[in-house]
Image (cartoon, helix red, strand yellow):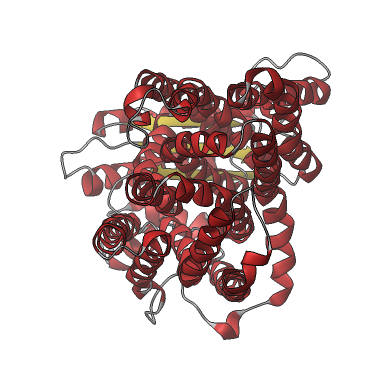
Amino acid sequence: MKGAKLTEKIMFRLLPAQILLSAVGVFNGIISSLFAGNYVGVKAMAAVGLYSPVNLFLIALNGMFVCGATILCGECIGRGDREGTKNIFSLDITMAGIFAIVVTIGHLIYGTLGTIIDFGDDPEVTRMLCRYVFGQAIGIIPLILGNQLSSFLSLDNRLKRTTVASIVYIGVNFILNYIFVAVMGLEILGLALAPAIGLWVFFFIQIPPFVKSDAAIRYSIKGIKWSDAKGIFRIGIPGAAGNAYNALRGFIVNSLIITYVGDVGISAFTASNTILSFFWQIPAGMILVSRMMISVCVGEEDRKSLTDVMKVALYRFMPLVFAMAFVVMLLAEPFTRLYFRDPSDPVYMMTVRGFQILPLCLPLSIICTHFSCYYQTSNRNLLVHILAVLDGVVGVVLFTTLLIGKMGVSGVYVANVLNGLIAPVVVFIYACMYKKGLPQNVDELMAVPPKFGVPIENRMDVLINDMDSVIGVSASLQEFCRRNGVDKRRSLFASLFIEEMAGNIVQHGFKDKKKHQIGICISCKQTNLIISLKDDCKPFDINQRWKMTDQEDVTRNIGIRIVQKLASSIAYQNVLGL
């Protein structure tokens, strides 16, 4: 993890908001199931469980737009293409809006006519499912469009608005559930209406930044290039396929549980999965952060930062999720009592077993999601599909079929854990095949192409923590330039620029008494000398500073003056708080 501190810091800073963003849809299920179990009954829990695969399928298709657009925009940001970012945003919102309308119509039709389709052996469960789907229809549009807006707010470094919108949604959802279900007695229709109305509040809170005339990311139907839709689908489909396969898996596993265990097994599986869905948002938020970071790194062709992101995932995120999973396992019975109070009821121990076994899937998912995201961004779509099929359908269905007959619903829980071991094996085998040997480090485990970015021997990274650290950078830079054949004149001017610029950032951005860092990267690519400075301080635009410089006093900001005259290009960006 040495040298990855700046990347680690920004990822953990982004993480809380992304967890909340990821949890927006899930809180619907958690709150609904709690009110269903305590105010409506076990049959309502079964109806909510039967809708779960539909919700997963909806999340998968919605994720296609979010994932494809986020990665494309991240690459545009990495290249400094602001117009391209705006065009992708406008196209994404338009396509997602059309999709939301179609899904809403489908929900309304099923909610009205769905009783002709029988799920399980209880017509009352089918009737409840229809009413639940009808109520859910009202919230489809704000759910889909709200998720798009949240992703772009994060890219535009507006985390506070996303956080506020998420917290308000959770509060409104809970209050309306209490009013509709506990007070008014609307039963399962109330369970659906409460989050649907809350999602509209969530959506409207996020709109203002995108309608301002001076917004960096702004909707404009005139800027839409429909040809870019191909790129969104090309990138988004492989990543969304995992959720689609999860939905298919849900249908198959639900059928197996009904056949071998019955509705009581569905209720236990739904209860344990619903609470765990909250904890699943921790790794889900982690991959949202990593996806943005990876896409920007690919756009910048920054090999070191790309591997740093994966190191943070493996060496920081994964241990945290292991610890969280262990705590959940210890709290198996308290969580079960949120739904079922009678230990003599078979559903009670079935649910306890779920909380004792299923949390082991959480840390294993970090490997699958992060490597899938990297493969997706690097256009290794076949490998993404292979991982999605194995992890999403084949593994769980195969292991469940083998175990459920002997172990009951516990066999389903064990099958999910065994399934989590498939992705690490696939990643390792692919890395061995790519390298034609055993991978020795994270770069080789990721199978980063040799021509991507700048080789380690052609770049130098320096971390600045204070003004004292600035002194001495110049000598290190000139030695690096000498080794890479850069002429003395350019190396002298570059060292002056770095000392001047880093010193300005320290004076300008370190005033708030918080811990800050400046990451300096100098790289030689062919005959070009490329200097990159990243910091987590208050925004400091070198071009604005140049305009404010006293043009008469040639001794002030001499390093910046020299580079302004020598550099082929100078670009400033404020991306994800860096």
Q: Residue at x 59, y 81 (%)?
A: 223
Please provide percent x and percent y for residue 9. Answer: 37, 35
Please provide percent x and percent y for residue 160. Answer: 29, 56
Q: Nearer the viewer, residue 164 or 262?
A: 262
- Taking the view exactly as shown, the residue that stands out farthest to the bottom is 222
Please provide percent x and percent y for residue 187. Answer: 38, 60
Q: Residue at x 22, y 42 (%)?
A: 510
In the image, residue 240 sits, relative to residue 409, either above or below, namely: below
Please provide percent x and percent y for residue 355. Answer: 45, 25
Q: Quadrant of residue 546?
A: bottom left
State left or right for residue 341 relative to residue 252.
left
Q: Nearer the viewer, residue 80 or 529?
A: 80
Q: Residue at x 58, y 38 (%)?
A: 523
In the image, residue 421 sits, relative to residue 6, either above or below, namely: above
Q: Nearer the viewer, residue 537 or 70?
A: 70
State left or right for residue 407 relative to residue 292.
right
Q: Residue at x 35, y 65 (%)?
A: 186
Q: Quadrant of residue 232?
A: bottom right
Q: Quadrant of residue 294?
A: top right
